[in-house]
Amino acid sequence: MKSKNHISYHHGSLKDALIQTSLEMIESDGLKNITLRKLTKKLGTSRSAVYRHYDSKDILIKAVIQAGFEKLDTNIKSTLLEGDDVLKRLYNMGKVYISFAIDNPNLYRTIFGHELMKEREESCDINDADGDTGFHILVAVIEEGHEKNIIKKEDPILQATVIWSMIHGISNLLIDGHIHIQDNIDALNELSFKTLINGIKN
Amino acid sequence: MKSKNHISYHHGSLKDALIQTSLEMIESDGLKNITLRKLTKKLGTSRSAVYRHYDSKDILIKAVIQAGFEKLDTNIKSTLLEGDDVLKRLYNMGKVYISFAIDNPNLYRTIFGHELMKEREESCDINDADGDTGFHILVAVIEEGHEKNIIKKEDPILQATVIWSMIHGISNLLIDGHIHIQDNIDALNELSFKTLINGIKN
DNA sequence: ACCTGAACACCGTTCAAGT
DNA sequence: ACCTGAACACCGTTCAAGT
């Protein structure tokens, strides 16, 4: 029975399966080794089936990147919400963020380095004060630091951007091999955090 | 006469012409729109001529990325060597670096985001104390700051890495559209620099 | 509704043949 | 030595045809 109607095996689930399998293939082989032919073969469908759900490979990849970004964002959010100590939460976020990049270098490279992302203007829109992204939580944590007189009172969005930039820069340079101090990552973590904090705390 | 022997037009210069034209095409159309067919058509050679100089497209692209990286590096170096004030030189470097990224987003994305760069281990090798890259000069400027008692005496390589990470992170987030504060770039510059400096100066 | 598979225009790469 | 152009195996995308 089961093997008979494999025609409708992906009925309703193909769309999601395409994303998940793409995420796996990006991490194992890199983005540029993903082809619709390999992807659909892995899923047991014909290659034109993709076009029922996405208008082109580029649009599929965009959705994959969005999914990858949300994966990272979920990690960041839960870390930022865990515990009371504001500074400790910021420090932990940095560690989790950098660990994500080190553990998923191809995915990280893809979600942040892709040319298609130039026109993005969703989840991370800083102007959208009502959002619920990791960045929004980061801003909220900084504002909590303002109220508790732990963090210097400057524009929290700019402060969040500075913190994010530092962490993002470290992650990027690490996975691209521009930093060759694998044994010294902890020291880099400590110094970057100290540098950030001494610059923004009261 | 001239148009007659176009067969040897690129005699000896094709190798370099491939790099230069690739750099232009990356910036105007993005890396993924570069094909050997378009590239060689633009240069007036047959497409297999490329293989006289590079074993594959990937290896050509690697050389292009290296050339792009050196372009940025040259900018950085001259900025770091200009003037006496240590802090001002660091500040100027940041501005020049970020400007380069904003002016050449596709190139910047390519030289830093490419999957091929995982195995890189040349110019930026921090362990090579004798190098002459922008990063090495940055370390030297920091050491000058140590001698002049302007900058806190910690491992200069780690300090350089922290500074570079911040600037690189800002550049990356800006060109990927994760930061939507175009009108506020100056404020971001100021705050990030202030954050760095207040964290590392005496 | 959703899937199939042949067809099309592209791509990187190879290679025997030219000068 | 260096270049040519046909050939090969791949790719994304389209579309008439199936169920």
Image (cartoon, coloured by chain):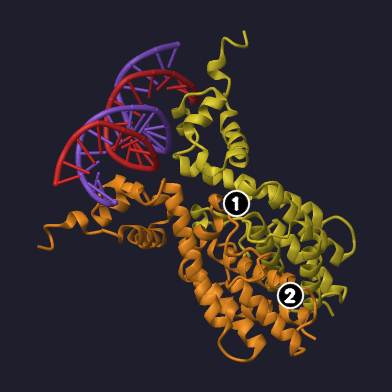
Chain colours: A yellow, B orange, C red, D purple
* Residue displayed at 78% across by 57% down: A183
From this view, report whether residue B181 is shown above or below residue D19: below
A55 or B75, which is in the foreground? B75
Which residue of the protein is positioned furthest toward the right in this rendering?
A84
* Residue displayed at 63% across by 63% down: B125
Cα–Cα gap, marks 2 and 1: 25 Å
Mark 1: which secondary structure?
helix
From this view, report whether residue B127 is shown above or below residue A22: below
Which residue of the protein is positioned furthest toward the left in this rendering?
B1
Q: Position of residue B188 (x, y in %)?
A: 63, 76
Amino acid carrying label 2: it is Pro
A128 or B22, which is in the foreground? B22
- Which residue carries the number 1 mark? B118
Tell me if residue B105 can be seen.
no
- Which residue carries the number 2 mark? B156
Q: Position of residue B198 (x, y in %)?
A: 76, 82
